[in-house]
Image (cartoon, grey):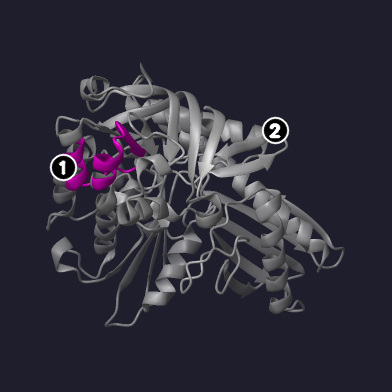
Amino acid sequence: MKSIRLPMTKEDAVSLRIGDVISLQGMIATGRDRMHRYLFDERPPAAHIPFDLRGSVLYHCGPIVKKTPEGYQVFAAGPTTSMRVERYTAQVIADYGMRGVMGKGGMGAKTLDALKEHGCVYLQAIGGAAVYLAERVTKVAGVWKLEEFGMAEAMWILEVNDFPAIVTMDAHGKNLHEEIEKKSRSIFETLIAPRRGIAM
Amino acid sequence: MSALDDAVVELYRKAATSLPPDVVNALSIARSHEAKGSRASLALSVILENIRAASKSARPLCQDTGIPVFFLRIPACVSYREVKNTIVKGTKLATRAVPLRPNAVDTLTEKNSEDNTGTGFPVIYCDEARGNRLIIDLMLKGSGSENIGQTYKLPDEALFAERELDGVRKCVLDAVQKAQGRGCPPYIIGVGVGATRDQVTRLSKEQLLRRLDDANRHPILARLEKTIRDDVNALNIGPVGLGGRTTALAVKIAVNYRHPATYFVDVSVACWADRRARLIYDIQNSKYRIQS
């Protein structure tokens, strides 16, 4: 498992290849549907965001966070489906300079092009492993737009340690999701081909 | 019925923080089938570790605590409205107590109700029970897996799917091929066949309540369930969709009578975090128990 310290340099990001299993150390930020639409439509200057996204990872996640006397505590923080923010991601990478986008299920052609253009990778986190992943959050460093967007849609700034992920789209135009889809498609076509009866 | 408020909270806690033993067992077996050191094996190890951690700390095992879907069986002497009110109240309490992520959004204003209730939310289906026990089955239906469900109308030319059970098999394969890893595999797949579109969606959802190791009482369907599961696994989409031998833990099918001219097939998919729990309430002595 390759350990990646955040913020990442462009060289770090470009050195990663699909299939690499990595673990993240450092600061990441969450953002899902509403945050992406906001960053895309309003294009707030980076200075207005209480966290420098450059070199960081934007994590598609709507966590469960509890306010305790000691501060915020992340209870559950698994990935959400990334494809829903496909429309916005290329521009958000161009505007804010993340080196990683993390979620689940992979993304589309526009994002893949943006990863190549800017030197960025897509990371798949383990879907549903919300407690395991929340236990890898060592600190909630801040939150942005909590009142306005609510708990799930706000941007949470999280410090993580040994946070596992798999590189599934890299800066060289390779897409592991696409390769798996292609292989399963040919098996699928054989399985549905006419004249293949099932033994009853 | 007010004794039930706490019971409903407990039911939510049970469903959100642990998985039924048959699901955990199937996931362990799936891990043993994957090559050591593979992505699939890593994913299943993290998933199993996550289940342990959630159960130990009584935390929701996935941050998407889903759409609460209830299937009730109510004794003839009990009012449906009363049970429904209890569930709504218990849902509000559970949202704070467990905690659940507030997931109910007003479609017109986009405002989140913050307590997981609203018009038509939670989803509640109801039947009459035999005897004096009120049975409340709760499924916390992950939205990622809900989004990959599909309804088909046979025949379907593109799939070479005729109005026959082999056509049903093709529908399931198509739904999974389209979904790939987006709904958090390994999946549990419910299938309903029948006369109308609305009926088959409920029927397929209801199949997700079945224990993974149960046997369909119709031998034909029991065989079909295995055939489809094996075909789905042959697609090699794998745990979390990054390749591997287990894409589906189980397929569960139910068929109703249909109209000669209609043949609807609904495919309802649960993610590996197949969270379900049952509350059994004895009306006579007001005692309840909760089981997974």
Label count reads 2
Chain ID of residue with mark 2: A
Badge 2 local density, few (<14 within 10 Å), some, or many (20+)? few
Residue B77's spot in the image, x, y percent?
Answer: 77, 79
Residue B236's spot in the image, x, y percent?
Answer: 26, 38
Q: Start and end of the magenta stretch?
A: A91-115
Residue at the (14%, 34%) spot, across then down? A173
Q: Residue A70 carries which label?
A: 2
Amino acid on which the number 1 mark rests in the picture: Lys
Q: Nearer the viewer, residue B31 or B46?
A: B46
Q: Distance between the residues labelled 2 and 1?
A: 49 Å
Q: Residue B4 carries which label?
A: none
Image height of A111 relative to B263, above or below: above
Q: Earlier in the sequence, mark 2 or mark 1?
A: 2
Chain ID of residue with mark 1: A
Q: Which of B210 and B140 is in front in this view?
A: B140
Residue under label 1: A182
User: In terms of secondary structure, where does tag 2 sit?
Assistant: loop
Residue at the (48%, 38%) spot, across then down? B26
In this orientation, does residue B175 appear?
Answer: yes
User: In terms of secondary structure, where does tag 1 sit?
Assistant: helix
Displayed quadrant of residue B126: bottom right
Query: Residue A60 in magenta?
Result: no
Residue A97's spot in the image, x, y percent?
Answer: 29, 35
Q: Which of A73 and B178 is in front in this view?
A: A73
